[in-house]
Image (spheres, coloured by chain):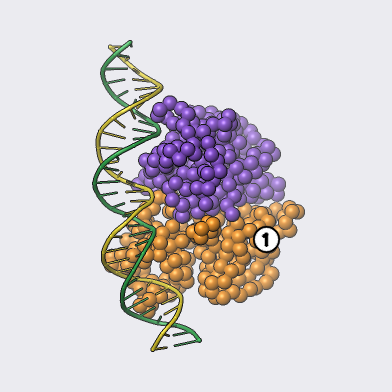
Chain colours: A purple, B orange, C yellow, D green
Amino acid sequence: MLVKGDAIASELNALAREMAFCGELRYRGNTKIFGEAEPAEYLYQIVKGAVRTYKLLSDGRRQIRAFHVPGDIFGVETGEVHRFTAEAIIDTTVRLANRGRSGADHDALETNKLLKLVTLNLQHAENQMMLLGRKNSLEKVAAFLIEMDGRLTTTGALTLPMGRRDIADYLGLTLETVSRELSRLKSLGILNFKGKKTQQRKIVLLDRSRLAELDP
Amino acid sequence: MLVKGDAIASELNALAREMAFCGELRYRGNTKIFGEAEPAEYLYQIVKGAVRTYKLLSDGRRQIRAFHVPGDIFGVETGEVHRFTAEAIIDTTVRLANRGRSGADHDALETNKLLKLVTLNLQHAENQMMLLGRKNSLEKVAAFLIEMDGRLTTTGALTLPMGRRDIADYLGLTLETVSRELSRLKSLGILNFKGKKTQQRKIVLLDRSRLAELDP
DNA sequence: CGACTCCTTGACAGCGTTCAACAGTAGTGG
DNA sequence: CCACTACTGTTGAACGCTGTCAAGGAGTCG
């Protein structure tokens, strides 16, 4: 069975507590943190805010690998350069951790932590492959909500930091389809919007069990 | 830019040469090697044959993670159990390598090798996410041929061990669509079939540069 | 020979995309 | 304060890519 997002996230948090961080940086919304193929010098842990990591095709098609929220670690690379771009979605604060000296081999403890992090990334990617290749649009949106529910629900409401376009590029859909399926879930009584008429990024999940049934 | 399959494969081969293998097993085509959630005790390296690794949804929808051909290592798990099923596609011989003692921490050298293997898996998964989420059917089939061309071309011809159904479940398509796009590539003069009328698994690539242009 | 598997091909349907219009909110500057 | 613009999100209508359903050919095996 698939491991859900929250299980992965909680293990990430446990790992993060043991790491040695060495600095802090702030980014405004929609600004680049690092780009694909740039040298990878640090690990990043989010203190506040949200980040998307993605790859692009030459014609601009975008596939978002993952969303990262407070507590998450990203930029885990074992090679010399980043394999994807990272951007702050909203105003974001990150802590930096040094990667082990490149070239020289790391000490065993550090490599073990790195192994754990890369493995969690791989698990997430494998689950996302299943979603992208074999789920329909309603199932994709349901899975997305379940993942985010497990990671950033605070006060009973789910406040999405990202817009419809980002969600679409995460799920392999268009923003219109995402919007339609969210409306469908609302009309089914499974969720409700809370914010202003547009910018509907505050969602209240009314029926988690029926939502879960939509994600096979 | 995306790392192509052959780059990953060649690094795998380099790694494999340093590993300590401890046994050999044979499997007939379409037989299980290990199942999802079963205890993970070994690493496997293919000597001869071909293997698919995949996940299933409860209703039977299948997503193939990867195809493995001679030289490849699969079953790289850091947890206690396998996250996916592995099946021999055709008659297959594999070598077994012990995973480090679970629980106790492995020596640094071994962990480093494991890290390399998991990272290569992650790279492949990230590229596959781009393919599944954002490429159309022709681009998917082209990418598949390019990947396989880099891994199992021997005598100028590309002999695919897997059937259309497997290819479809790897690319997030149906077998009919795979068949149609292969026919299209043939009618475009980019490839030719070599085998008997059905069982068209021998493919000759006539124009690799035009094929590459189809994969953005 | 008949049953079976694998693949191809055609016709059609439908899911998701594309194109478009519109609404609500925020920011800017007169 | 209000116009004007920009941005985000929703919704409708039409299209088209891919899936579904079906038929048929070619090869294999008992």
How many badges with numbers are in the image? 1
Q: Which residue is mark 1?
A: B39
Picture quarter containing residue A150?
top right
At horizontal 39% and vertical 48% (from top left) the residue drawn is A57
Q: Is residue A170 left or right of residue C12?
A: right
Is residue A49 left or right of C11 when viewed as pictured?
A: right
- The picture places residue B15, in percent across and down from the top left corner, at 60, 61
Seen from the viewer's position, the closer of residues A32 and B129 is B129
Q: Secondary structure at mark 1?
A: loop
The vertical placement of D11 against A113, above or below, is: above
* Residue in the image at 47% along x and 47% along y: A140
Label 1: how many Cα within 10 Å (few below 14, some 14–19, many 20+):
some
User: From this viewpoint, is residue B198 visible?
Assistant: yes
Q: Position of residue C12 (x, y in %)?
A: 28, 60
Question: In the depicted view, which residue is nearer to us: C9 or A194?
Answer: A194
Name the chain under label 1: B
What's the amino acid at mark 1?
Pro
Which residue is the extreme one toward the right? B104
Residue B212 against residue B1 in the figure, above or below:
below
